[in-house]
Amino acid sequence: MDNQNIQDKEAGIVVTYTAAKQPTCLISKWETATAELSARQILKLILLGLALVAWYPIYSQLIPFSNWITYDLLRITRGTHLGDAVSFFFLDIPKVFMLLILVIWAVGVLRSFFTPERTRTILAGKREVLGDVLAALLGVVTPFCSCSAVPLFIGFVEAGIPISVTFAFLISAPMVNEIALVLLFGLFGWRIALIYMSMGLLIAMVTGWIIGRLNMERQVEDWVYEIRMGQTPALLQKLTWMNRIDYGLHQVKDIVGKVWLYIILGIGAGAAIHGYVPEGFLAALMGKQAWWSVPVAVVLGAPLYSNAAGIIPVVQALLEKGAALGTVLAFMMSIIGISFPECVILRKVLKPRLIAVFIGVVTVGIIIVGFIFNAIM
Amino acid sequence: MKKLQVLGPGCPKCMELAKRSEEAAKAAGGDFEVEKVSDLSKIMAFGIMITPALVVDGVVKVVGQVPSVDEIKKIIS
């Protein structure tokens, strides 16, 4: 910490030094900049507060709203296939977007406390089993996208974190997807959300542990062990609350900007299934009796890649038509958790054998979870 | 002269940050040198694990985000 303070002071000295060259101009500029900023920040906080207060009253009125659009505005007859599909569509669109915006923002603020650098510090020096458990939990809250999987992996290896712990983290991050978690909570209730989360964590811990037992250290590309990391920059150590709120808003802009199309397509597909596929139609195909449907769903899902937000409306519609929960969850986990692009990226640091083991172990894990679910629910 | 370094192995976000940094450097009008760093060992020597990142005169200023051109202008000037 002391070290950081010194760095800060040094940065401060440099700034005043350059400011001394043109004092009046820069100082007045600086003053107007801060004055403008704080007024804007206050306005932003007020608007955010209003939005938060208004959120629930609006959310609770979505069913009447979708009925009004479908049956009054568009004049579709009640009880028809088209009516069912259209009202599903107009209910899920605002619902999913409202949940998504609120949750991504809240998760963004939460995540600003768990930077990968801090996670690395927490995990370094932990014994394997405790490390696996912690890593899986931290994987849920630590922000990272698949492009950062490689530097993250190297950073973990460099800190001396065991392979099993590193994999527990890398598996849990996509497996327990926070967007999926919240949408499951919003659309199906807390029980399914909780089951999804604990199963994802369990897979991450157990598969990480198994990969650790297989002595895979030699299957990491050699150059990875030669990289030396620098000191964590001061920037990542001091964040104000305003920074955290802004970070959350940035995340909303980033993620919603990227996935909105997937969501609309997903809800469209879900609406079509909801309206036109007969009740119980999927029971024979994806129901509990069809044991083979779990592996088939996982194998089909693995090469598919979609965003969690796009897949959940489809899941909702499939469940309604008699598909078994375990089968559907397994399908979803394999779509979200095993992604081809990520494997290509990880190939930079992992030899093919380890990639194969990684995919294999996770696939088997998801299949087992699917079976367990179908057996107990 | 100020030195801007954009760190990233070449993902879409990194390229966007590089593009915006160049725009911001032009708009700010000062004397800037913009360098793209894609070598992982060099990136990690800055102590970060999340890309893209923006480094101004050796100090890490942005990690894991792509700020707007205006925001970058403020950061670098």
Image: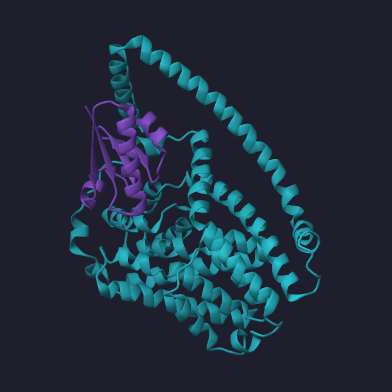
Chain colours: A cyan, B purple
Considering only vertical position in the picture, is A203 above or below B13? below
x and y percent of residue A289 in the render?
A: 62, 90
In front here: A343 or A63? A63
Identify which residue is drawn at 46% across, 21% down: A33
In front here: A364 or A315? A315
Left or right of residue A73: residue B18: left
Number of numbered discs present? Answer: 0
x and y percent of residue B66 in the render?
A: 40, 43
Q: Hey, which quadrant is residue A179 in on the image?
A: bottom right
Left or right of residue A190: residue A218: left
Considering only vertical position in the picture, is A142 above or below B28? below
Q: Quadrant of the C terminus of chain A?
A: bottom right
x and y percent of residue A371 in the render?
A: 55, 82
Q: Is residue A40 in view?
A: yes
Q: Hey, which quadrant is residue A320 in on the image?
A: bottom right
Identify which residue is drawn at 62% across, 86% down: A288
Identify which residue is drawn at 31% across, 67% down: A344
Left or right of residue B39: residue A144: right
Q: Is residue B49 in view?
A: no
Q: Quadrant of the N terminus of chain A?
A: top left
Left or right of residue A369: residue B75: left
x and y percent of residue A258 in the render?
A: 48, 55
In front here: A26 or A204? A26
Considering only vertical position in the picture, is A255 above or below A82? above
In front here: A250 or A325? A250
